[in-house]
């Protein structure tokens, strides 16, 4: 069970697999006013930076589930490094359909809403693990600028313009699902650079270390084309944020 190899090559050195920075992740943790002992569930936990740093900074406990063995291993190492291995647990597995045995105060899916077929399905899934008064966290892209054509949407690596909403519409859509938006922290273009540009050095170093790898052609093609594509499209058109929701 694993994710496509391109991600484990390009994002092997990332601690955060999203355009949110360590600083903004800390802002989000503080904004949620987390009490020590709060139980957090994180579906698609990646390399575990959110759970590990919030365990260190706010005394939360919890579980992360991720399909990537590499990222899950990195998350366990990060927990040990930050001295929170007794508070957080990382499970390698498919988070689709995952409901926690014990209800949680924070149920999160940050940048992996395909796990339950999109934003609405993911919110419904997370709600099944949530205790009364708890908070759902969803990390999701939105259109910072409306893409003028379907070609531009695809150049942002979206399937189509309909894949994402503008920020006001995304916020309103949470209301239609029956949720109050109670907080949000938005990424900015510098955060996008940390997520996307960090892949380029990783790819370059990977190519130097794996000259004969059958995957080298694909990685080389990406390293060649990605900086200009990213600057022209993703960086201009796509926003990204984490939205905190409570059922009405
Ligand atoms: N929330 C993390 C990771 C976001 S990237 C962070 O912000 O850093 C998306 C993550 O979803 C990747 O780590 C990927 O391995 C994971 N993923 C993809 N499909 C999944 C699935 N079906 N179940 C669990 N995790 C999945």
Image: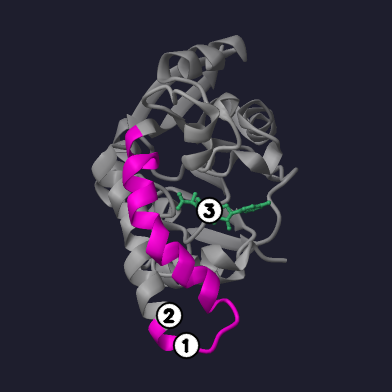
Q: Quadrant of residue 173?
A: top right
Vertical order, 54 against 128 (above or below): below
Query: Which percent across, then down, holds residue 2?
Result: 67, 65
Farthest right residue in view: 97
In the image, the segment drawn in magenta is 208-236
Q: Main secondary structure of the magenta part?
A: helix
Q: Is residue 176 above or below residue 68?
A: above
Q: Check if residue 231 falls in the magenta segment.
A: yes
Is label 2's Cβ within 8 Å of ligand 1?
no
Q: What percent of the width, then of the height, locates residue 247?
A: 57, 17
Label 2 SS: helix
Q: How many marks?
A: 3
Left or right of residue 175, residue 28 in this image: left
Mark 1: secondary structure:
loop
Of residues 204 and 97, which is closer to you in this image? 204
Please report contact status of discs 3 and 1: CB closer than 8 Å, yes or no.
Answer: no
Of labels 3 and 2, earlier in sequence is 3
Seen from the viewer's position, the closer of residues 170 and 213 is: 213
Look at 36% across and 79% down and name the residue there: 205
Q: On residue 207, which mark appears? A: 2
Res 53 seen here: no
Q: In the picture, which quadrant includes the N terminus?
A: bottom right
Q: How crowded is the residue under tag 2: few (<14 C-alpha within 10 Å), some, or many (20+)?
A: some
- Mark 2 and mark 1 residues within 8 Å of each other at the beta carbon: yes
Q: Which residue is mark 1?
A: 211
Q: Tell me, for residue 45, which label it has, or none.
A: 3
Q: Nearer the viewer, residue 168 or 243?
A: 168
Q: Is residue 79 above or below residue 143?
A: below
Q: From the Cβ of disc 3, is ligand 1 less than 8 Å away?
A: yes
Q: CA distance from mark 2 to mark 1?
A: 6 Å
The quarter of the image holding the C terminus is top right
Task: Identify the residue at horizontal 72%, vertical 46% (top origin).
Answer: 96
């Amino acid at each position: 069970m694993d994710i496509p190899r391109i991600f484990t090559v390009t994002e092997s050195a990332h601690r955060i697999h999203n355009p949110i920075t360590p600083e903004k992740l800390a802002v989000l943790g503080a904004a949620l006013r987390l009490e020590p002992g709060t139980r957090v569930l994180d579906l698609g936990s990646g390399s575990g930076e959110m759970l590990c740093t919030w365990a260190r900074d706010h005394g939360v406990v919890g579980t992360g589930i991720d399909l990537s063995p590499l990222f899950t291993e990195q998350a366990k190492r990060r927990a040990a490094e930050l001295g929170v291995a007794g508070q957080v647990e990382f499970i390698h597995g498919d988070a689709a359909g995952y409901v926690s045995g014990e209800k949680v105060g924070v149920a999160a899916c940050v940048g992996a809403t395909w796990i339950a077929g999109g934003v609405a399905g993911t919110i419904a899934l997370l709600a099944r693990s949530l205790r009364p008064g708890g908070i759902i966290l969803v990390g999701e892209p939105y259109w910072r600028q409306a893409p003028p054509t379907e070609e531009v949407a695809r150049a942002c690596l979206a399937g189509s313009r309909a894949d994402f909403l503008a920020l006001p519409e995304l916020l309103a859509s949470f209301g239609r699902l029956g949720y109050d938006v109670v907080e949000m922290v938005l990424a900015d273009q510098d955060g996008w650079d940390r997520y996307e540009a960090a892949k380029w050095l990783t790819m370059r170093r990977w190519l130097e270390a794996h000259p004969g790898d059958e995957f080298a052609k694909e990685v080389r093609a990406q390293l060649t084309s990605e900086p200009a594509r990213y600057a022209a499209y993703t960086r201009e058109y796509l926003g990204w944020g984490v939205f905190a929701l409570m059922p009405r």
